[in-house]
Every structure is written in structure tokens, then in C-alpha cells.
Image (cartoon, rainbow, N blue to C red):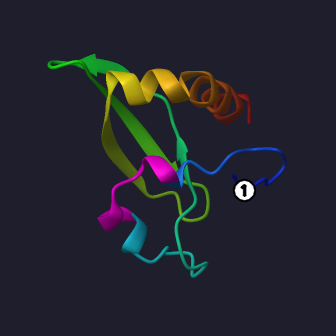
Amino acid sequence: MHNIGAKMNFNHLMEDKSLKRRCKSGNGQCYWSPAGNIRSTHGNNVHMTMFCKHCGLREDIFLSKQDYEIQERLILKEIKHVYAR
């Protein structure tokens, strides 16, 4: 876990191809955080929108219901922080 102002880096939820891409801001790797738009899909999956805190790039990801439930409190806490800005 990386702390920047006590906020968490959610890169561990991203696919490898997204992590290999260089950040457009020039800071190396993107710093991914959930941006809301959480919804359930068929097959017990959860769709979420993520954004890079450095360059603003957005990307949609799918998590299994179990993976989402493990991270749910942290995800919702981070989304509240994003909308509080």
C-alpha cells in the first residue's frame, strides 16, 4: 500500500497491460484510483471506472464479486474522497 495523504493506490486491481503503459504525465506508472460508476454485471462480476491521479486517464475494469467484496470498504472510501474534492 502506498500512502499519499493517507490515500491508497489501487494499481493491484488493474490488468498487467494497463500497468505496463507509461503515464502521460511523465511520472512512470499511472496511479489508479476508483472513480465511481460501480455496477454489477452478468456472471457475478462488478464493473468499475478507474482513473489515474497523475494524468486523468480513465479505464473500465471488471472484478469478480468476491474480489470486489474484499476491497469494497476501501473502494467506497476512496470514491467518497474523490467526490469530496
Count of marks placed on residues = 1
Let me know if residue 49 is in the magenta part: no
Position of 53 relative to 60 (above/below): below
Please indicate whether residue 44 sits to the left or right of residue 56 in the image. left
Q: State the predominant SS element of the stretch in magenta.
A: helix
* Picture quadrant of residue 46: top left
Residue type indicated by callout 1? His
Q: Which residue lies furthest to the right in this view?
A: 5
At mark 1, the secondary structure is loop
Residue 60 pos. (x, y %): 32, 43
- According to the picture, the residue beneath numbered tag 1 turns out to be 2
Judged left or right of residue 66, residue 34 is: right
Look at the picture and state if 7 lies above or below 48.
below
| Magenta-colored stretch includes residue 14 | yes
Q: Quadrant of residue 43?
A: top left
Residue 83: x %, y % from top left: 65, 29
Instruction: State the extent of the magenta-drawn residues as a range.
Output: 12-18
Is 61 located above or below residue 27 in the figure? above
The image position of residue 2, as x and y in percent, is 72, 56
Q: Where is residue 29 in the image (x, y as percent from the top left)?
A: 53, 72
Q: Image point 48% across, 75% down: which residue?
A: 24
Q: Is residue 53 above or below residue 85?
A: below
